[in-house]
Image: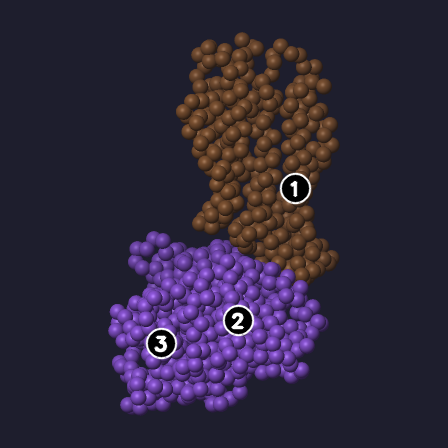
Amino acid sequence: MRRFLAAVAGSMVLVLAGCASSTTGTGGSTQHGGTVTFALPAGTVPTYISPFVSGPVSNNIDLFQFSPFLWRPLYWYGVNGQPTINYQQSMAGPPTYSNGGRTVTVTLNHKFTWSTGKPVTNRDVELWLKMLVAEKGNYLGYSPGSIPDNISSMSFPAATPYQFSITFNKVYSQLWILYDELSEIVPIPQQAWDRTSSTSPVGNYDLTTSGVQAVYTYLNSQATSESTYATNPLWKVVDGPWLLSAFAPQTGASTFVPNTHYTGPGKPLISRFEEIPFTSTSAEFDALRSGQIDYGYLPPEDSSQASYFTSRGYKVAAWPDFGFNNFFLNYTNPTAGPIFEQLYIRQAMQSLINQPQIATDIWHGDAIPTYGPIPIKPTSSYLSPAVARNPYPYSPSHAKALLVDHGWKVVPNGTDTCQRPGSGSTECGAGIPAGASLSFTEEAATGSAPFTAEIQDQVSSWASLGINVTISQKSISAIFATLEPCSNGDAGCTWQIANFGEPGATPTYSPQYLPAPGPWFGTQASNNVEGYSNAHMDQLIANTYVNSSVSAIQSLAVYAAQQMPGLWEPDYSYQISVISPKLKGALPQDPNLNLYPQYWSLTS
Amino acid sequence: MAELSPMAPADLVVGPVDPGEENPHSPWISFLRVFAENRLALAGSIVIVLFFAFCFLGPVVYRTNQVATNIAQASRGPSPHHLLGTDAVGYDVLGRLMAGGQITLVVALLVALLAASFGLVWGAISGFSGGGVDSLMMRVVDAALAIPGLFLLIFLDAILRPSVVILVVVIASLAWLAPARLVRAEVLKLRTMGYVEAARGAGAGPVTILFRHLFPNVIGTMAVNATFQVADAVLTVAALSFLGLGIPPPAANWGSMLSNGVSYVFAGYWWQIWPAGVCVVAIVVAFNFVGDGLRDAVDVRLRRR
């Protein structure tokens, strides 16, 4: 699987140019200075420091809670807990369009400078874009057909160093360009990074393909050298509010101090910011209880401990991410694929998942039912009434009727078998032979007790109507390693259903912020590990690239919700945050998973 | 040639019996007398019997649904309806202990049987053959023992899809090493005994000597070892399940119950932790006591008292 982060957008309706920062203080007597400790997700540490994030190496922490402290993206998304563009935090103003809409021109804000004192200019954008063109296969956010594949030409005029233009191969939706294409760009310091080795002089290597490839090779080698993160001169040239002052490669612990030359919005108030790694959620929880962590999280199984912290003045707040959660079905599996192709089968299985009850009784309200690709929370203008309601509420009788009506012999707590093969409206469906059984294997993630309880409940519910699902629990990385569509004759491709389950491991709409699930549900899309293919879905996805109306995304969402390329299941919050009473400014939390420690302060 | 006959398997002795020595009691009575003198062994036997009754007969008396979840009743404390409360998906914990115990005990017994049998054959052939065959077979054992056991178990368990059969085979694949060495040492000693030499002189072939003269004399040692193997297998099953590598849900065993319960330790759901933990400890201790008792009982020196 190429990656698990993708697309999306926020609503133009919600776009408020010049709006306030996405984080707000909560009052009280603040003091400058002090150290704030932040708990990293268990088992996850920074692995890549360069903002040209690597597909094979990078993780969510690199993407949202490490690199952006040092290098700011061109455009920033997230306003007061809403997944929308934030021009106040961005390095450029609203893009302008010309050439019939094919050319987009971006003007950089003059106030941003590098820590060397030099301004951030279009040369810094050019280096990043040239590197993307030459090394798109190594970039985490690359999706075939999108940037840079759809670029006809680029212009970085020396006469206007704060401006650049990109001409696309056709007219695209301005919403899509802003939220899915320009959102990828992160200016990087050409004055310091345009080199091919630590001893080579800085040049203009990026102006040739071979030159920029050599630059990438050098930067990539440095970006994975964790022992030099805090000392490498490359990483000292930043335009973000923080500098990395210490990094422990053995543990992944990092310490940031304010970049004293920072000229952007939100100069740090605290004097140190530490990201603390943990090998397990229980270790994190112990540290949290002992007061070693200012900004941590409750493990899902310990959600009942919220009152322990609130009684001590801590703030406990769910951190919902702007994404969705679903099972992955292998449509290319020789046995299960033809069965999953049948919409009525997916509808029957979905009708046996009691999402509201799972969210309440297993996740204790820390998960939100998923009714389609657009999350119910945080709310956005993309959420139409048609997607805000459950298209397939829990109904065993409806599920049974669907199976019986299509020629299946239903054997509760046994195994259903196809009695009427064929492709007619009352038959099992094309490719399903007589006697075929509704018997599958589900690769499910280990680790989280509530998630294990959830899959137990789902399996039990399916079994009640003879849909026999055997659980095979593996680590998330082991499941990821097997998730590819089966090619013809691939005997090793045996997976049928996959379920990651862990909070923080579900699909999230960033750094492509438009909530259009094309990267997952489009034929041949980068995240389409299921081998799902639906011509009408492809048409609707393509429409979101060229139609700037929110309704284009809503139409796609409605169709995807009904079709269920994957079965919907409750989406857990990214984490249940526990915030020290002395820490101010951490709320609301960004649904795009970014952190804003520069706005945090401590009270005495 | 009556003196040269092997001991009957039921004699359960560690060493060869001196045919010239008289025993006032039958071997079985001596065996039982020594075993019964060990109070802990007796207590262990009773505990094991009670556990088997609890796991296999209990569900007949205390009927619960261990198939369908009921999350509306999740994590409820003990009550008249659920004597030991419910777990995270609403299963009755007492009924779950019975169902989980069945798998735990069956896996443990099968592992002990398989490991002891294979170890017996491997060790006996190795010790009886001697020379290059012995060296080669023991180097195989040494090499397998050099691999960290838990690492290998986790590796095998990860690449195979856990089921009762897979779990038995995986655990037994390591468990046979100790009995193999034990048996080999015994056979090395026994093969030089007079009655073996006599049998060989009388024209008995290797297979006959192994099955008629050597196996019966090491069977006692193996019986003792097998009890410890059961205890070890219970712990291994629990450990693998605790690590999430046991038989996947909805099947249960005490290790997975303990693992799931411990996740809720801060929630105060003691009924999801203590009962499974107590079961694991009790059955392991019981099998160890019985093993100690058997060891005493098969020791001919103690029988002569």
**How many residues crowd mark 2 within 10 Å: few (<14), some (14–19), many (20+)?**
many
Q: Nearer the viewer, mark 1 or mark 2?
A: 2
**What quarter of the picture does the C terminus of chain B occupy?**
top right
Residue A377 location (% of width, % of height):
53, 78
> Is A86 in front, or is B188?
A86
Q: Quadrant of residue B9?
A: top right
**Chain letter belonging to callout 3:** A
Residue B253 at x, y = what percent?
A: 59, 49
Question: What quarter of the picture does the N terminus of chain B occupy?
Answer: top right
Evaluate if marks 1 and 2 touch, with contact meaning CB atoms under 8 Å apart: no
Instruction: Identify the element where label 3 is drawn.
Output: helix
Element carrying mark 1 = helix
Question: Which amino acid does the dot numbered 1 rest on?
Answer: Ile
**Residue at the image point whose x is 52% and y is 22% from the top:** B187
State the residue position of label 2.
A256
Q: On the picture, is A129 further left or further right than A454?
A: left
- Tell me, what hue is chain B? brown
